[in-house]
Amino acid sequence: MPIRMRFTIWRPLATAATAALLATFLTPAATAHPAPRQSEPVHSYEDAVREAVWVDTGHDGNGDGEDDRVAVDIVRPREPARQGRKIPVIMDASPYYSCCGRGNESQKKTYDADGDVVGMPLYYDNYFVPRGYAFVGVDLAGTNRSDGCVDVGGPSDVRSAKAVVDWLNGRAKGYTSRTGSRRAEADWTNGKTGMIGKSWDGTIANGVAATGVEGLETIVPIAAISSWYDYYFSQGAPLYGSGPDWLSDYVNSPEARAECDAVQQRLVDGAPRTGDRTKLWSERDYVKAAGKVRASVFLIHGMQDLNVRMGHVGPWWDALAKNGVDRKIWLSQTGHVDPFDFRRAEWVDALHRWFDHELLGYDNGIDDEPMADIERRPGQWETSTTWPPRSTSTATLRPADGARPGVGTLGLRPDRGTETFTDDPALSETDWAARIDEPTAGKAGFVTGPLTRELRLSGASEVTVTARSSTPTAHLSAVLVDLGPDTIRDYGDPGEGVTTLTDRTCWGPSMPGDSSCYLETAAKTTDVDHTVVSRGWADLGNHASKWQGRPLTPGKAYTLTLDLAATDHVVPAGHRLALIVAGTDKDLIDPPDDTPTLTLDLSRTSARVPFVGGTAAFARATAGRATAAPAPAPRDGVSAPHTTHRVPKGGR
């Protein structure tokens, strides 16, 4: 990791001469107390200050002639202010505090008769306030008790949270009420802020960090979006049948729904379903602004997240690395799940140590630990000093004709053949993988022999295809598949790899109306014969540009490179690695207007895959004969993804 400046805890010392003189007379000799390595729960949670502040964003989103104010609910320990000490802040800015709820149990904010928060969702306040942190829950503009309109990751959303960071650092105005003139000052904080949140909440943390705002020391984005275009499209291929206007309406407060028609219309006009990149999407691309990020980043994502997909991880991670940002990452086998629900005790400990280091300046060693934690099997984790490992490099794999149509081979030598398939919107990646060894009309599959040694993929892949379409529109999917028996988290299940139990564990003190006790979870597993490890989709009409499509000329060859999402997966010895190229991936992208038949030119089709050990590792793993043989029968995988409308939501 890059060298970073560390904050240190210190106390006033006498001059060297005075200290020496005192040492002569003091018996026994005075000894310095070691610097603390961990914050302890020494403050009263029951006696904590609970207050509401409305922060002026400097923006009139709803067009009522007044700057919008966002509601900020605060829980902070009372003792530090009495002692004249200022404290750091942990902040979760969310659109979900009233409409939909937060976390596995869909908690919402509750208030007392004075309008101060009583029930703060999640455990952050219960756990961290006694340890000397303030917790701040921000209602994004247009939600709950805030003014303005939701603009789905745009300038208003980001400004909502950034204004609070500015207020905490004395650069913005706060008030004790939504409409009054009585000022509220954040004189109890030192301004050091860490943002955290899952999904949309973590997305806002990414967006605020990308402004470079001073005082934001760290962010912890969990299953978060890094570019909103990539939430709705993949290289022109639509991932959902609706745009950001639907999502805005989903979370807008009743007041916002009545006042925000103009904003809604701008979302409609700025996000055409053509898949072309517009100014609206550029405003919501945090990756391109990664050069402004000052905060450290602790990123958490599920490698089988089919809501906020892994495609949001690779570009953001790489851009942060290029900018020299201090980073840490956890990659689980789950879908869209919070680490509190897939690795609870270890997560709370890691988060505690991370915030202690980044916000309190404690030298607890977390910055010297491995960069990555990766789940290999359900509940079994390993670490990686850097991610991807330094020994990782790409190997160019070539598909080739096999003995039967549609059942080809995958290796290092190019081929001159062709493969043809017809888009079938009724089929998904699980259907293709289940019949990888059979000629089927809906896919072209290419498979290695059984591996003689394990092979680790780490990072993002690319698949370049040259294809002719029989119609003016065509969508393409490319997936990498581990063919072999395994027990994995059942990410296709409604729990996305976890199941909720009936017993509770507690994470800090509780008080009436705000419990720190949450339902425990366990891994929900399934036995499979294949695992999809990485995916990518594109509109073939975007062959000349990722951001703008054009009609195809039937029968003409086009070359397109599909970006496959980053992952970290070990293909065991005896398993096989497969590349599948097909059309519509059912329930993961929408079908094109036509039903094309596509012909691949294998001499101009390849996959660039990052292996630990690179091309040499692939060559060794595919050399010789392995003892395992491929199974001839259709293969069992996870159940198909759900067809319900997905939302980047804090709960599962």
Image: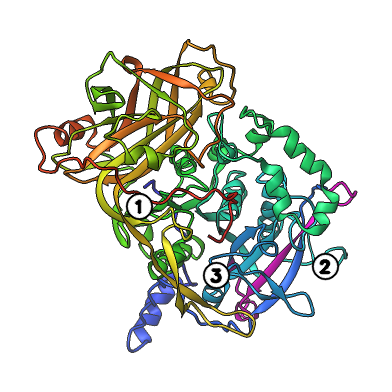
Q: Nearer the viewer, residue 153 or 59?
A: 153
- Residue type at tag 2: Ser
Tell me where the magenta segment starts and ends, as one range: 62-88
Q: Residue at x 83, y 44 (%)?
A: 261
Which label number is shown at residue 177?
Answer: 2
Q: Does dot 3 land on a helix, a strand or a loop?
A: helix
Q: Earlier in the sequence, mark 1 or mark 2?
A: 2
Q: Nearer the viewer, residue 163 or 417?
A: 417
Q: Is 98 situated above or below 289?
A: below
Mark 1 sits on what residue?
A: 372
Q: Is 7 situated above or below 128?
A: above
Mark 3 sits on what residue?
A: 124
**How far apart are labels 2 and 3 at the CA level?**
25 Å
Residue 304, position in %: x, y?
A: 42, 49
Q: Does dot 1 land on a helix, a strand or a loop?
A: strand
- Residue type at tag 3: Tyr
- Please state if 406 lies on the left or on the right of 151 as rendered: left
Quadrant of residue 138 within the rendered picture: bottom right
Q: Earlier in the sequence, mark 3 or mark 1?
A: 3
Q: Does dot 2 land on a helix, a strand or a loop?
A: loop
Quadrant of residue 635 within the rendered picture: top left
Whether residue 27 appears in magenta in the rendering, the answer is no
Q: Farthest bottom residue?
A: 27
Q: Residue at x 12, y 32 (%)?
A: 623
Quadrant of residue 271 within the rendered picture: top right
